[in-house]
Image (tube, grey):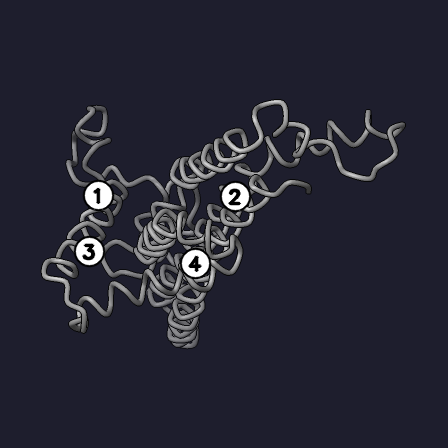
Amino acid sequence: MTDSAKVLASDLHFPPGTDSFNFRDWFAGLSDTALANVFTTITFAVWLTVAILIVFFLWAYRKPRIVPTKRQWLAESAYGFVRNTVSIEVLGKRHGVRFAPYLTTLFLFIILMNFWAIVPAVQISPNSHIAFPATLGILSWAIYNWVGVKKHGFLGYLKATCVPPGAPVFIYPLLIPIEFLQNLILRPVTLALRLFANMFAGHLILLVFTLGGFVLLQSDNLLIQSVSVVSWAFAIAMTFFELIVIALQAYVFTLLTALYIQGSLADEH
């Protein structure tokens, strides 16, 4: 690599690492102040996501009609998709309608947060920072545990969750700690890590191919320069693949949350 390529690679943080996820870039020179932590690319994406969801549904249902308008149909389609394919399908009609608003909000919030990963000038999902998936995982954990305790009572919920029905009593000392760890401790962790890891890895992959193309272009060798086109082609292809991951991870997170709620409402596991 030539000196100019090395300089460019350094400026572009290539190869990308953990520094590629630090975005204190809105107020240069204020990196040590609270203001720099508030106004960043990540916080902008989060607050704009919240604003988009609120404004969209207020706009869609401003004047609801029996025969829906296009905007009302769009909002109802988004709600109906989650309600019918996730909420009612997993929880049944009675509980499915009850939890459909939360599950729809969760799905739309995650998919919009993920979508920032491929939006030009932003190109990173807030969910590539563990704090946001962890908060969503804890929220779902609190809801399904609260639902279970409300239905069964605290001790009854612990029994239904941690004591496998039909298992021999002599293996309870082995099974109960495993069930407790799996059902009450690890679920929010796995929810958060699955979403975080996919968005983190997607951001790194796109950076490798995008920034790698610029580094290759700075070479003095014409053949190496031509390879930059291949790198950018892979970046475009991976962007389309990332679009699939964006939707899939939002669906999986919502589906698992519905399954956990269903398990909390069930009489036996």
Q: Earlier in the sequence, mark 4 or mark 3?
A: 3
Left or right: where does residue 43 sit relative to residue 227?
left
Q: Position of residue 172 (x, y in %)?
A: 82, 28
> Number of labelled discs?
4
Q: Position of residue 139 (x, y in %)?
A: 42, 36
Q: Position of residue 228 (x, y in %)?
A: 39, 71
Element class at badge 3: helix
Which image quadrant is residue 66 in? bottom left
Residue tagged by mark 2? Answer: 261
Element class at badge 4: helix
Q: Residue at x 38, y 65 (%)?
A: 81
Residue tagged by mark 1? Answer: 47
* Quadrant, the C terminus: top right
* Quadrant, the N terminus: bottom left
Labelled pair 4, 3 in contact (Cβ < 8 Å): no
Give the Cα distance between marks 2 and 3. 25 Å
Labelled pair 2, 3 in contact (Cβ < 8 Å): no
Give the Cα distance between marks 1 and 4. 28 Å
Give the Cα distance between marks 4 and 3. 37 Å
Marks 2, 1: nearer the viewer = 2
Foreground of the two, 134 or 183: 183
Q: Earlier in the sequence, mark 4 or mark 2?
A: 4
Q: What residue type is disc 3 on?
A: Phe
Residue tagged by mark 3? Answer: 57
Q: What residue type is disc 4 on?
A: Val
Foreground of the two, 100 or 153: 153
Left or right: where does residue 152 sit relative to residue 268?
left
Q: Residue at x 10, y 58 (%)?
A: 62
Q: Residue at x 46, y 45 (%)?
A: 196
Labelled pair 2, 1 in contact (Cβ < 8 Å): no
Left or right: where does residue 21 sit relative to residue 41?
right
